[in-house]
């Protein structure tokens, strides 16, 4: 990315509305809180009428306005209309954060094909739909940033969570290609690869080494937006660790924990 492109990316992160797809996401809300001062924030989630606490938190953080819209990630047919209505109603979108997804139950997914497909549908198929529509809209406005959450689980898929990991691997590849396709359009994509995040989604699970909190992930994302980064690992030291882990023999890799 050129110096000029990075400067434009930083400017776009500072101007316009912020759209959070997954309006109850812990990580998403932590990011939104940091971006809120003086901004119009749009929270998109199911049961959008029940987002009073999330809305108030963003107003308390300094948002100039907080709008709540109905969004069902699994309703692919509704994505385009919703996203177009957001742009029409609230103006250019400076930052769109895709913070929706499910972890699923690996043991159940291994014996229940419907559950396996449900995980992949939400964590991969729905993301592709949203990203494709958003890319079209942001290209038309000539600016904007997309924040996409991959995971280290998708860098090299482990036996212990291969359904979720495979969805993240697919999303990582799609987002990487989309980011290249957007080059020169005024729109850019930041791909975030967190490790284990201690929060509601992982409640009851043993924390992995080099775990992060939602707040730490949000801090890294906001720094990345300010810098115009294309890739963000959280924590950053996971990047060299996974460079080495990719070389681990399969016989050892298949015994790796979640």
Image: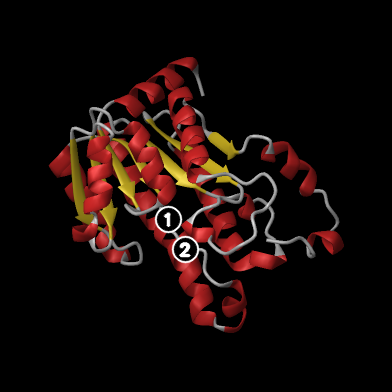
**Residue 31 in the image, given as x and y percentages of width and height:** 40, 39
The residue under label 1 is 128
Left or right, 256 with reference to 236: right
Q: Dot 1 surroundings within 10 Å: few (below 14), some, or many (20 or more)?
A: some
**Residue 112 in the image, given as x and y percentages of width and height:** 55, 83
Give me the residue at 44% from left, 24% from top.
226
How is the rendered protein coloured?
secondary structure
**Residue 51 in the image, given as x and y percentages of width and height:** 24, 55
Any part of residue 205 in sight? yes
Front-most of 125 and 234?
234
**Does 163 appear above or below 51?**
below
Q: How many marks?
A: 2
Residue 102, label in figure: 2
Among all residues in the image, which is located at the extreme top?
3
Give me the residue at 20% from left, 51% from top.
68
User: CA–CA distance between discs 2 and 1?
Assistant: 15 Å
Any part of residue 144 in sight? no
> Circle 2 — which element?
loop
Q: Quadrant of the C terminus?
A: bottom right
Q: Residue 154 lies in what quarter of the image?
A: bottom right
Front-most of 228 and 195?
195
| Mark 2 vs 1, N-terminal side | 2
Give me the residue at 42% from left, 55% from top.
128
> Circle 1 — which element?
helix
Residue 44, label in figure: none
Among all residues in the image, which is located at the extreme bottom?
111
Left or right, 2 with reference to 13: right
Nearer the observer, disc 2 or disc 1?
2
Q: Residue 106 lies in what quarter of the image?
A: bottom right
Front-most of 33 and 171?
33
């Amino acid at each position: 990315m050129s110096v000029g492109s990075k400067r434009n990316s930083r400017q776009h992160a500072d101007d316009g509305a912020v759209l959070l797809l997954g309006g109850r996401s812990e990580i998403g809300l932590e990011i939104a809180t940091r971006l809120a001062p003086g901004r119009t924030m749009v929270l998109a989630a199911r049961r959008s009428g029940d987002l009073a606490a999330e809305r108030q938190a963003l107003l308390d953080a300094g948002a100039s306005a907080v709008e709540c819209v109905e969004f069902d990630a699994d309703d692919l047919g509704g994505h385009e209309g919703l996203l177009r209505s957001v742009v029409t109603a609230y103006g250019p979108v400076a930052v769109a954060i895709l913070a929706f997804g499910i972890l699923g139950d690996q043991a159940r997914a291994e014996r229940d094909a419907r559950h396996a497909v449900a995980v992949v549908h939400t964590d991969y198929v729905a993301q592709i739909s949203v990203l494709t529509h958003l890319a079209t809209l942001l290209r038309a406005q000539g600016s904007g940033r997309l924040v996409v959450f991959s995971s280290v689980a998708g860098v090299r898929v482990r036996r212990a969570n291969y359904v979720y990991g495979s969805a993240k691997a697919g999303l990582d590849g799609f987002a990487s290609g989309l980011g290249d396709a957007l080059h020169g359009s005024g729109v850019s994509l930041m791909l975030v690869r967190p490790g284990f995040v201690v929060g509601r989604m992982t409640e009851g699970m043993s924390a992995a080494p080099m775990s992060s909190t939602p707040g730490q992930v949000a801090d890294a994302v906001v720094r990345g937006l300010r810098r115009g980064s294309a890739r963000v690992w959280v924590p950053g030291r996971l990047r060299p660790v996974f460079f080495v882990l990719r070389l681990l023999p399969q016989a050892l890799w298949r015994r790796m924990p979640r």
